[in-house]
Image (cartoon, rainbow, N blue to C red):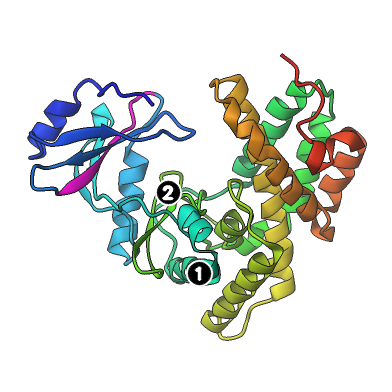
Amino acid sequence: MDVIIPEGATGFLHKAGWADAAIEPLPGDASFRRYFRVRQADGRPAMLMHAPPPRENPEPFLRAARWLDANGLRAPVIHADQAEAGFVLLEDFGDVRVREYVEAWPDDEAAVYRAAIDTLLALHRLPPGPFTDYSLSEYLREVRLFTEWYCPARGLYVDVQGWTAAWEEALAPLLPRQRPGVTVLRDYHAENIMLLEGLEAQGLLDFQDALVGHPAYDLVSLLQDARRDVSPEIEAAMFDHYCRGASAAAGGAFDVDTFLADYARLGAQRNAKIVGIFVRLWKRDGKPRYLDLIPRVWAQLERDLAHPALAPVAAWFAANIPDDLRDPAGVLGGTFAA
């Protein structure tokens, strides 16, 4: 763990009224952001986020946090910020993440996930927030991470133009259904949801990349988690729980089959993107530990590709990715290119 306190942090805390607070570094994530727990002499805690420009920009986090809080959702309260220097002092949600809690108390898993689905339903009842649209060009930029990073690392020469064309065809039916759209947090999963008071009071983290898009995106992010196994039974039950809530909100005008097709489309899109990101984290950023997560993500990708809505993308995989690399159990086997 990097224990070096960023230059300017003590001055920022002094101006924020936390001059004498103790500073404790916390483990980092896949980004260039760093987090510190700060604690006053009386025990009062807060979180210090350092998102240093030019690699990071705290402004999107601040905008999203304030919008979520203003609309009744539990993002951390912002105590102070110095965005130009990358510093934000925010509410401390504690240490109880959904991931660790449900692993310790598996009998509570369904209740915890139902509460997380209820948070999504509440978010989706709101008009979309002040965020950019999740455009086709953004979807395509993300899935190209697969051909830009994973395929070269595997020594594969693939049909890149065909990859883009397949995704354009697969995503075309979905695009009209994400207008006017909902706020999409884009990284909604068990490591970014905190338990605050009981199982149902849940706090949100890591929403700085929020866009306006399709309601299935955050649902598939939660239920096809890259970092923990969500059983098929829990995924199916929570999918049904979401659909019942969305149908009630729409007065019964909710097509489950169409929504399931879009869920598969966005699951495949997200999982293909994540495979590329995890390889990039290794090759570019020197973080090889994310490679161990690829088999789980790949298994989810293969399940999504089985849906007829993904037929163009499934055909591309059949033509470009050798069968021995498509077995999730052996997806990390063989040799990655240096």
Residue 335 in picture, x, y percent from top left = 79, 21
Q: In this view of the protein, which residue sits in the foreground, 328 or 277?
A: 328
Relative depth, front residue between 256 and 44? 44
Residue 183 in sight in this render: no
At 55% from the left edge and 57% from the top edge, which residue is drawn? 218
Q: What residue range appears in magenta?
A: 44-54
Where is 93 relative to 144, above or below?
Answer: below
Image height check: is 191 above or below 240? above
Q: Residue 329, position in %: x, y?
A: 80, 41
Query: Which residue is disc 1 drawn over?
Result: 108
Is 24 displayed left or right of 215 in the figure? left
The furthest residue to the top: 338
- What secondary structure is found at the residue carrying circle 2? loop
Q: Which amino acid does label 1 sit on?
A: Asp
Circle 1 crowding by C-alpha within 10 Å: few under 14, some 14–19, many from 20: few
In the figure, residue 272 lies in which quadrant? top right
Q: Name the residue under label 2.
A: 207
